[in-house]
Image: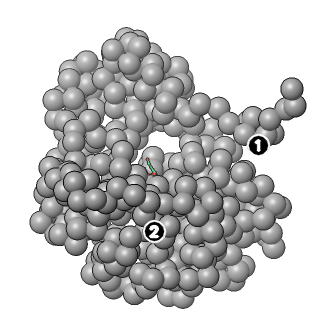
């Protein structure tokens, strides 16, 4: 038989699936994969049920139903003062993951280079490789996860087509400062590359405001902003995501979406179209709940001797390991001896070995789950 795709052949099972499987096999409490172990708000689920019963069950328009694109546009204006044309500057995708994939396939040619700040979400690498482009990692340095400007400048050349930023940042919990985004923006302008800004944790910040990359001076014309409702509504299985950006970029991204999935499940789009414009009250409660859960986990881990890095955003907490321990063996040991599953962070790095000295906990869990995990970690 003839060999299969050389690019795909390199892909292995993601660390998230591996750790979740190991957690299940060992009956461990799963603080590894980034999704809640509780359901999303019942009022949003009711909206989907209503849509399912109201004949919204056929293919949706490929760009996404207009009321959802209008709601997305409405929120960018309301929360960030950004003007987004719902007719030409928004495409609804199967989660942020598909938006990332379509952006890479829509913008990149073989031989192009993409600068990615590591540690990074694993789908970036696969999407870039499937587009035939080259990943150029630049390391965010612990404990504050800053980038070194010289390292960054050295990573950029005439082939650089795209920079991927994730803000708020998984797995570190970092929220980039205005100065950092401005530095990245200046480099994008000077070297004429695009920015993919993955902002799926936009509403999960603690004491700092989220500011989309596209709202910085002159960056809108070269920025594709990607987000989704998975994290914000605790409904990761619905996979309602989007890319917004200049019309000609969205057209290219949509061209890939059209031939990969064509459209997104229609009933969930109707539910989200309504939920997004009614989220004010919900957001207050949502942020308070997650801030509380973060404190439960951080205080508990600190009491148990973990050296935790307090996140400014996301629902993840990184902990630095004691001297002499490495992440994969530490995580396996935690599952076997303490029945708690976490994520070894080396999986988020390509270049640096910094990840081997940290692990990631997820606090998007019921209080009882967090407390049981902390009890096990005593
Ligand atoms: C940084 C980042 N981007 C994108 C995603 C994927 O989002 P979605 O579930 O909407 O595809 C995740 C999910 O964990 C993430 O952490």
Most extreme residue toward the right is 2
Picture layout, residue 307 above or below residue 187: above
Q: Position of residue 370 (x, y in %)?
A: 22, 31
Q: Is residue 196 left or right of residue 65?
A: right
Between disc 1 and disc 2, whose residue precedes? Answer: 1
Which residue lies at the image location 72% right of the left edge and 79% below the top edge? 191
> Dot 2: what SS?
loop
Relative vertical location of residue 184 with respect to residue 232 in this rendering, above or below: below
* Res. 148 image quadrant: bottom right
Rendered view: 348 above or below 106: above
Residue 83 in view, yes or no: yes
Q: What's the image's color scheme?
A: one colour
Find residue 158 and report its horizontal and vertical position in percent: 81, 73
Between residue 87 and residue 215, name the one nearer to us: 87
- Mark 2 and mark 1 in contact (Cβ < 8 Å)? no
The residue lying at 46 percent from left, 75 percent from top is 90
Task: Look at the image and tell me in which quarter the N terminus lies.
Answer: top right
Q: Tell me the residue that label 1 is attached to.
A: 7
Distance between the Cα atoms at labels 1 and 2? 31 Å
Question: Within the image, what quadrant is residue 122 found in?
Answer: top right
The residue wearing badge 2 is 61
At 21% from the left and 42% from the top, the residue drawn is 39
**As rendered, which of 250 and 198 lies closer to the eye?**
250
How many labels were placed on the picture? 2
Query: Can residue 229 be spotted in the picture?
Result: no
Quick check: is the Cβ at mark 1 less than 8 Å away from ligand 1? no
């Amino acid at each position: 038989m003839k060999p299969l795709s050389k690019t795909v052949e390199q892909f292995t099972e993601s660390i998230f699936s591996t750790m979740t499987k190991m957690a299940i096999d060992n009956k461990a409490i799963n603080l590894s994969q980034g999704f809640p172990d509780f359901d999303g708000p019942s009022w949003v689920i009711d909206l989907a049920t209503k849509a399912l019963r109201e004949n919204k069950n056929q293919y949706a328009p490929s760009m996404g139903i207009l009321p959802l694109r209008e709601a997305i546009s409405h929120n960018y204006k309301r929360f960030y003062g950004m003007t987004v044309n719902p007719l030409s500057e928004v495409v609804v995708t199967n989660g942020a993951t598909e938006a990332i994939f379509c952006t890479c396939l829509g913008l990149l040619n073989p031989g192009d280079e993409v600068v990615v700040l590591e540690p990074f979400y694993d789908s970036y690498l696969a999407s870039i490789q499937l587009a035939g482009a080259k990943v150029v990692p630049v390391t965010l340095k612990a404990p504050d996860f800053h980038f070194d400007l010289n390292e960054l400048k050295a990573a950029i050349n005439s082939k650089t087509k795209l920079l991927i930023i994730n803000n708020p940042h998984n797995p570190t919990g970092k929220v980039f400062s205005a100065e950092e985004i401005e530095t990245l923006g200046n480099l994008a302008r000077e070297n004429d590359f695009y920015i993919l800004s993955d902002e799926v944790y936009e509403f999960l910040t603690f004491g700092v405001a989220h500011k989309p990359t596209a709202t910085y001076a002159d960056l809108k014309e070269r920025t594709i902003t990607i987000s989704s409702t998975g994290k914000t509504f605790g409904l990761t299985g619905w996979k309602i995501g989007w890319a917004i950006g200049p019309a000609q970029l969205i057209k290219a991204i949509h061209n890939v979406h059209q031939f990969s999935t064509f459209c997104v499940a229609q009933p969930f789009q109707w539910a989200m179209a309504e939920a997004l414009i009614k989220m004010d009250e919900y957001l207050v409660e949502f942020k308070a709940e997650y801030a509380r859960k973060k404190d439960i986990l951080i205080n508990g881990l600190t009491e148990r001797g973990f050296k935790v890095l307090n996140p400014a955003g996301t629902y993840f907490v990184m902990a630095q390991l004691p001297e002499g321990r490495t992440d994969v063996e530490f995580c396996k040991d935690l599952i076997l001896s303490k029945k708690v599953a976490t994520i070894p962070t080396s999986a988020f790095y390509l270049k640096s070995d910094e990840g081997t000295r940290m692990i990631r906990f997820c606090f998007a869990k019921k209080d009882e789950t967090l407390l049981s995990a902390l009890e096990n970690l005593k």
